[in-house]
Amino acid sequence: MTDLFTRSAIAALSLVTAGSAMAQDNVVNIYSSRHYDTDEQLYTEFTEATGIEVQRIEADADELIARLQAEGRNSPADVFITVDTSRLKRAKDAGILQSIDSDVLKDRLPASVQDADGQWFGFAQRSRIIFFDKDDVANPPQTYADLADPAYQGKVCIRSSSNTYNQTLLAAIIEHEGEEAARDWAKGVVANFARDPQGGDTDQLRGIVSGECEIAVANTYYFARALASDVEGLSAEIDRIRWVWPDQEGNGAHMNLSGAGVTAHAPHRDNAVAFLEYLASDSAQKYFAGGNNEFPAVEGVETTAAVDQLGDFKADEVSLSAVAENLPLAQQIFNEAGWE
């Protein structure tokens, strides 16, 4: 590698890996809820560059958070990796992360994807946007607010309120527009449901293909995945689906992230920090984001061919750390609106 990680992070690691370091300490233990084949390349490249062996456990994010809490000071974990701002906040609130101060991360990553206390960092982004049936919808919603317009009554498919992506979207609306506007929005979207919330984001897109709904809300990588590979019930008729990048005249399209932090009792803290700094390198960004058809957090890193097809857009640059503080209120609003 020839980018910033090689020049700075590896140099810093010399103190960790030099003479007196025990061989068994030359590791970094990762708890990850990501399960992508391309992540293997990440770990291999990191080890080749540093000599630090990567050991990992993969499981559901909530399972890993519970495990870290149960293990406490005896936990072997150094790094926690997961998806969505809400899960990173959950980890922070559970006390399983620690603050780190890294000039590499501060310089490489946008401020919007950094926790205010330095406990988590976003390394890939995805956007939650609007999809529609090009044959049935002549005037699709252009903003998130439009999803609550009575003109779209009975047309919208979207996941349940327990879904973390929806929670973070509503939390962002609260941050931008305030509590009352968020309440009105949630009630309006419920009134426009084409069906009761069910399934994942792919199922919302399948709803357009099946004719159950004319408009759907989903994360970009689910659609990009169907462009790049054969997704049952979606890819064969994906040409009938078009998309809108919302709020292009306003705040921009809502962004979420895949991110990581150093665990509270990391036994190999320096190695853990070095691994996070490595994730901000150009080569790692390509693998980390590309494995799930996401957008790299670092500007200028190339995206996958499927992501390229989605075109250019204006992204919301609101601080996701600030958005995370609104998550409990978002769930309350969902409940009051009758959003199942």
Image: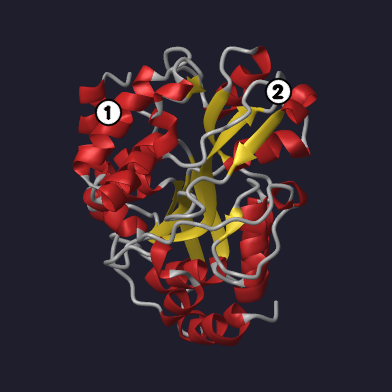
- Judged from the image, the secondary structure of the residue bearing numbered disc 2 is loop
Q: Give above or below for 134 relative to 172.
A: above
Q: Dot 1, crowdedness within 10 Å: few (<14), some or many (≥20)?
A: many
Q: How many marks?
A: 2
Q: Give above or below for 97 relative to 100.
A: above
Q: x, y (%) of residue 142?
A: 52, 41
Q: x, y (%) of residue 33?
A: 48, 42
* Tag in front: 1 or 2: 2
Q: Quadrant of residue 139?
A: top right
Q: Which residue is mark 2?
A: 135
Q: Dot 2, crowdedness within 10 Å: few (<14), some or many (≥20)?
A: few
Q: Give above or below for 167 relative to 238.
A: below
Q: Amino acid at mark 2?
A: Asp
Quadrant in which the N terminus is drawn: bottom right
- At horizontal 44% and vertical 55% (from top left) the residue drawn is 250
Q: Amino acid at mark 1?
A: Phe
Image side of residue 176 versus residue 316, left or right: left
How far is disc 1 from disc 2 in space, using C-alphas?
A: 31 Å
Q: Quadrant of residue 211?
A: top right
- At horizontal 33% and vertical 43% (from top left) the residue drawn is 65
Q: Quadrant of residue 148?
A: top left
Q: Nearer the viewer, residue 287 or 233?
A: 233
Q: Which residue is mark 1?
A: 334
Image side of residue 309 versus residue 149, left or right: right
Q: Which numbered disc, 1 or 2, marks the residue that appears first in the sequence?
A: 2
**Quick check: can you spot residue 79?**
no
